[in-house]
Image (spheres, rainbow, N blue to C red):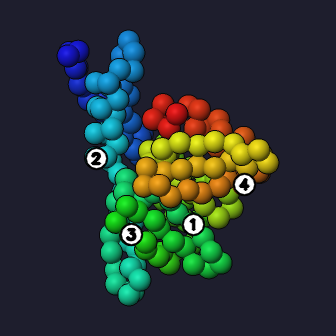
Amino acid sequence: MKEIFIHFEEDKNSDRVEIIVRASEKDNTIKKLMEHISEFSSKSLTVYDNKGAHCVVNENDIIFVSANGKQVHIVTSEGFYYAKERLHSIEKFLNDDRFLRISRFEIINLKKVRKYDFTIGGSFRIEFENGMEVWASRRYISIVKKRLSGEEGAL
């Protein structure tokens, strides 16, 4: 195992915590370290179940978020939830490194993607670990393709 050195720098002008992981390569140790840091810094979202009861969902558990009219659905491995916020507000709340908008109506968790592929007609299908799938809109395909090709876990 590589030696890990941690130090703190105070920056009174900063309004956030910035963590930089510097190593000779991004091996399994580094990947696991970054996953732990990411899990520690994840946010929780207040949502509602199908009976209208308040629930708290960790953003790491979200598979995708979709809008259908004014209704916003939060899909997790535990079930389906609803949010009272608009999709745009939820998108601002979610971690940019983990989530990606794939259409006007959907945002996906990149860490939950199992595979993706193009169809003959030029559509872009994204399949998640739980077997569910969504389709990126043509307008977003180049953005999605660029981000997914950079995500080692999604390939």
State the residue position of label 4.
137
Earlier in the chain: of badge 3 and badge 4, it is: 3
Query: Is residue 109 found left or right of 28 in the rendered image?
Result: right
Give the mark nearer the N terminus: 3 vs 1.
1
Identify residue for label 2.
Answer: 40
* Residue to which mark 3 is pinned: 79
Mark 4 and mark 2: Cα distance apart in space: 32 Å
Mark 3 surroundings within 10 Å by alpha-carbon count, few (fewer than 14), some (14 through 19), many (20 or more): few
Separation of disc 2 and disc 1 at Cα?
Answer: 25 Å
* In front of the other: 64 or 83: 64
Q: Secondary structure at mark 3?
A: loop
Q: Which residue type carries mark 4?
A: Ser
Give the percent coordinates (x, y) of residue 54: 34, 80
**How far from the left and from the top, in percent, is residue 64?**
50, 59
> Which is more N-terminal, label 2 or label 4?
2
Could you tell me if residue 99 is visible in this image?
no
| Closest to the observer, 141 or 132 | 132
Relative horizontal placement of residue 6, taking residue 91 as reference (left or right) = left
Which amino acid type corresponds to the residue marked 3 in the rendered image?
Gly
Disc 2, SS: helix
